[in-house]
Amino acid sequence: MIRYHKNRSWFGELWDKLDGSNSKRKLLLNGNLVSGQETLSSWILEISDSLRISQVALKVTQNSLLEARDAIRNHKQSLQKQEYAIVQLSDQLDELAQKVTTRLNNLEAQVHCLEVRIAANEDLDHIVTAWAAGQTYTNFPWAVQVALLAREVFSSSVMMYELETGDTERYRQLLVNKIIATRKQLPDSFFGLGDLLDQSCMRMTKDDQELTAALLEIRSVPQQRLVNTPHLFVIGTTLELATLPTEARPAKPAQSALALCRAQIGTISRTTDAREFITYVVEETANDCMAMMQ
């Protein structure tokens, strides 16, 4: 229609003049329409280009989002693997810590046992060496010396060693052997226990008898402990009877002590030898000291 209006003939223009129309106005209107259509066409083309660009951008964005999703998924899997590895490492560290703790505890226990043993060795050597050198119990008969020496040894770190380790043989046998090796004048054969103790009392002063009886503490020992220490009971009772006034003192305190032991404590042999006597005294003293500590 626009092309028709632009190409109208002279007759058309004459017709316009006859009917009073303004051809210039129509031409201007037609020009505006053409310009508007061209502008609209350009705008549509621009929109099309924009849509095409937007589609490309959306495609790029979609690809980026997919890549981001894959990256996040891979990162999540990596984090899960790392978390699993951390858990395993934590378990391994806990296990290692437990092993180290157990090992340290064992080492500490071994060191402590070694310290206790060293202390026991030092105390035993110090006590026995002083006794062998004549620095302790010098004026007492050998039977009484054995009782006092055993009491001193098992009142030291030696008893702590026995309590903590449960070893009740090492130092007892060692002490017996040291006593026998040190005292060369011990009887070689069997002898009467009563005779040995009566002779020992006769060689002691009254003060020494009272002092030794007090050290052995026989009268303060409960009955349940006395039943396990018959030889110590006889030694202590002999010394106590020997300290009685002359009119009350028996002629043979040791024989009376043996009779009291059989009546109140239990059976005890009348004869013995040096090793057996020393062993009995050491064992009874050690057991009595342990009973007091427990």
Image: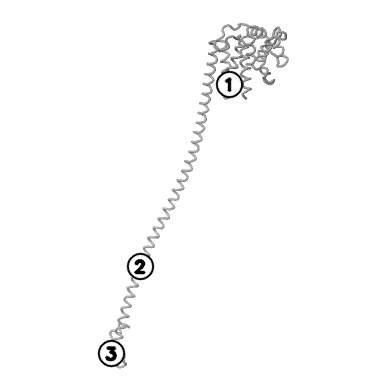
Q: Which residue is drawn at 35% across and 67% down?
A: 50
- Residue 222: image location, x then y, percent: 68, 21
Comes first in the chain, label 3 or label 2: 3
Q: Which mark is residue 50?
A: 2
**Which residue type does callout 2 highlight?**
Ser
Q: In which quarter of the image is residue 237?
A: top right
Comes first in the chain, label 1 or label 2: 2
- Residue 204: image location, x then y, percent: 63, 8
Report whether residue 236 is seen: yes
Q: Which residue is drawn at 53% across and 16% down?
A: 126
Q: Residue at x 64, y 16 (%)?
A: 214
Q: In which quarter of the image is the C terminus?
A: top right
Comes first in the chain, label 1 or label 3: 3
Q: Mark 3 points at which residue?
A: 13
**Image: 82 above or below 193:** below
In this rendering, position of residue 76 left or right of residue 13: right
Report whether residue 191 is seen: no
**Which residue type does callout 3 highlight?**
Glu
Q: Quadrant of the N terminus?
A: bottom left
**Which residue type does callout 1 highlight?**
Met
Q: Which of 12 and 37 is in front in this view?
A: 37
Q: Mark 1 points at which residue?
A: 159
In this rendering, position of residue 206 left or right of residue 136: right
Q: Distance between the residues labelled 1 and 2?
A: 102 Å
In this rendering, position of residue 29 left or right of residue 132: left
Q: Nearer the viewer, residue 6 or 94?
A: 94
Q: Distance between the residues labelled 1 and 3?
A: 145 Å
